[in-house]
Amino acid sequence: MDEKELIELKKDTIILAHNYQTPDIQAIADFVGDSLQLCQQAARVDKPYILFCGVDFMAESAVMLNPDKTVLMPDLGSKCPMAAMLPAERVREEKAMHPDAAVVLYINTWVEARAESDVTCTSANAVKIVKALPQRKILFGPDANLAWHVQKNLPKKEVVPIPYKGHCRVHVRFKKDDLLSLIAEHPDAEVLIHPECRPEVQEIADLILSTGGMERHVRQSKARKFIIGTETGLIYKLKQQNPGKEFIPALSSAVCVNMKKHTIDKVLTELREKKNVVKVDPALARRARKSLERMLELS
Ligand code: 13P
Ligand code: SF4
């Protein structure tokens, strides 16, 4: 496809892409960011179509924020497996057992479960959101490692992970010993780790950050070298923005196959055909939207 055709096809469509998308998709996207930034962008779209290059929960959030727009995905099979770890029924059971607790659900959760929550969060704002709530006890899910990070930062709160061991299959593969070896090899590197990593990995990081937080930090840091503890897709963007700096993946095989179901060919086909419409039950969407809007207010 030539540049002219691409411009023509994008007249009625905005392309939003997550930081883990491949370089060719990032290059033609209108905005590339983390889950929170993508929600904030989705709330401001002024075109009738949003082509979302990210996993299901992100595109569904865009649908909730834009009931009058059409949200498309290059591949409707791009789903985050962590979301399946917390069905709505489990949230209802936990609420009945802890009636004094607020329910904070990571955005990586099915819409039906999010409809049961008081407020949604992302890795960028989880600590801020929990801190802002008046309740001491917080039911937090599905990521138990992010729950650990929140608890560590807010010792006066009682953060109860639901389920007990919810996790991201990509980020739990980062190992403490591998990271310690990398740090020994590159003692001058700053170590940036995503809060979906295990506690023992988080404990040896210089900073725990969302992918958008890593991007901001690298831009203003005086360090020249960084060990990046998240999916490797982010490194493309970091290199583009910081040509003089060096980036070492904490785990070079950390690739989210679900995010990578989108390809540039599928993006271009979808721009032309507009067939893969993301659908969310309107009644559930209205309930889950309240939790999402509360997050945007508190962010
Ligand atoms: P971010 O919001 O930090 O980009 O994380 C999204 C995600 O799915 C991490 O695996
Ligand atoms: Fe889900 Fe993990 Fe992939 Fe993020 S990296 S979309 S949390 S499976």
Image (spheres, helix red, strand yellow):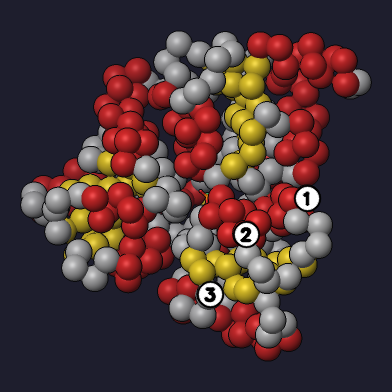
Which image quadrant for residue 251? bottom right
List x then y, in percent, for residue 23.
78, 44
Q: In this view, does 52 lie above or below 191?
A: above
- First-in-chain label (1 vs 3): 3
Q: Quadrant of the C terminus?
A: top left
Disc nearest the viewer among 1 and 2 = 2
Please name the amino acid that badge 1 sits on.
Gln
Residues under labels 3 and 2: Cα distance? 15 Å
Q: Mark 1 = which residue?
A: 240
Please name the amino acid that badge 3 sits on.
Asp
Q: How crowded is mark 3: few (under 14 residues within 10 Å), some or many (20 or more)?
A: few
Q: Can you see residue 67? A: yes
Q: Which residue is drawn at 55% across and 81% down?
A: 176
Q: Can you see residue 288? A: no
Which image quadrant for residue 262? top right
Q: Mark 2 = which residue?
A: 220
Residues under labels 1 and 2: Cα distance? 15 Å
Q: In this view, does 168 lie above or below 44?
A: below
Q: Quadrant of the N terminus?
A: top right
Give the secondary structure at mark 2: helix
Residues under labels 1 and 3: Cα distance? 23 Å
Q: Mark 3 = which residue?
A: 206
Q: Residue at x 19, y 43 (%)?
A: 92
Please name the amino acid that badge 2 sits on.
Gln
Disc nearest the viewer among 3 and 2 = 2
Cβ of mark 3 under 8 A from ligand 1: no
